[in-house]
Image (cartoon, grey):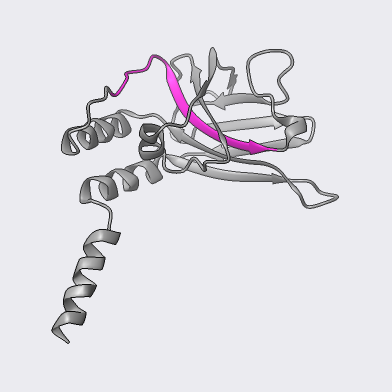
């Protein structure tokens, strides 16, 4: 019986993420939203996406995680309003950029209700660091940092993704 209890305690310690990671994941979940867009005819997923609003609270939590884990990486600072967006779409709709050839457009709706277009969309290589900082990003998705000009987000900002096949929106309550 004692052997069984010891085994259970050891497994619990090994299987449980550190409190630093668990605390960080809680904050990352707070600032992350998820959505899907399906084809009406075939019920195929045309877009599966997640976005994390990069806030001071999130960046502070990343710095704290780096310090607690004694990681030798810098947590960058960002200008404007930023999101980390993970998206999965079929190959025919796979281009996401500021170029005219992009299959997807993204817009931020802030306090005044006006749509704001991004100033930068940058594909991010999903490294171990990004997997820890943005745990919502599945390995089969492409990850992007989307930068908007500094925007008054108000109380319920919304991020809209649209293409020829439809549109999808994510909302935050601040």
Q: What x and y, as percent, mark residue 22?
A: 28, 50
Q: Foreground residue, 167 or 112?
A: 167
Quick one: quadrant of the N terminus? bottom left
Residue 144 seen in this snapshot? yes
Quarter where residue 87 is shown: top right
Q: What x and y, as percent, mark residue 110?
A: 51, 26
Q: Foreground residue, 54 or 158?
A: 54
Q: Is residue 82 magenta?
A: yes
Does 103 appear above or below 89?
above
> Residue extending furthest right?
41
Does 49 appear above or below 121?
below
Quarter where residue 108 is shown: top right
| In-image side of 37 versus 110 (left or right) | right
Question: Residue at (46%, 19%) from the top-left corner?
Answer: 151
| Majority secondary structure in the magenta region | strand
> Residue extending furthest bottom?
1
Does 129 appear above or below 41?
above
Q: Is residue 54 magenta?
A: no
Residue 152 seen in this snapshot? no
> Residue extending furthest left?
2
| In-image side of 120 versus 89 (left or right) | left
Q: Foreground residue, 143 or 85?
A: 143
Count of numbered circles in the view: 0
Quick one: quadrant of the C terminus? top left
| In-image side of 161 versus 26 (left or right) | right
Question: Residue at (61%, 31%) from the top-left corner?
Answer: 160
Q: What x and y, as percent, mark residue 43?
A: 78, 52
Q: What x and y, as percent, mark residue 49?
A: 59, 39
Q: Foreground residue, 38 or 158?
A: 38
Q: Which residues are magenta?
A: 75-89
Quarter where residue 132 is shown: top left
Question: Residue at (45%, 41%) from the top-left corner?
Answer: 32
């Amino acid at each position: 019986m004692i052997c069984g209890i010891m085994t259970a305690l050891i497994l619990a310690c090994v299987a449980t993420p550190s409190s630093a990671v668990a605390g960080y994941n809680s904050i990352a979940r707070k600032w992350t939203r998820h959505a899907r867009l399906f084809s009406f005819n075939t019920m195929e997923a045309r877009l599966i996406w997640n976005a994390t609003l990069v806030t001071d609270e999130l960046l502070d939590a990343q710095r704290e995680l780096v310090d607690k884990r004694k990681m030798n990486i810098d947590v960058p600072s960002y200008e404007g309003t930023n999101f980390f967006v993970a998206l999965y779409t079929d190959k025919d709709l796979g281009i996401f950029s500021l170029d005219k050839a992009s299959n997807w457009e993204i817009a931020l709706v802030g306090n005044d209700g006006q749509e704001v277009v991004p100033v930068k969309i940058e594909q991010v290589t999903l490294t171990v660091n990004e997997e820890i900082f943005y745990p919502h990003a599945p390995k089969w998705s492409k990850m992007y940092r989307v930068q908007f000009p500094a925007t008054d987000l108000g109380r319920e900002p919304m991020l809209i993704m649209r293409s020829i096949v439809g549109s999808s929106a994510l909302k935050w309550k601040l």
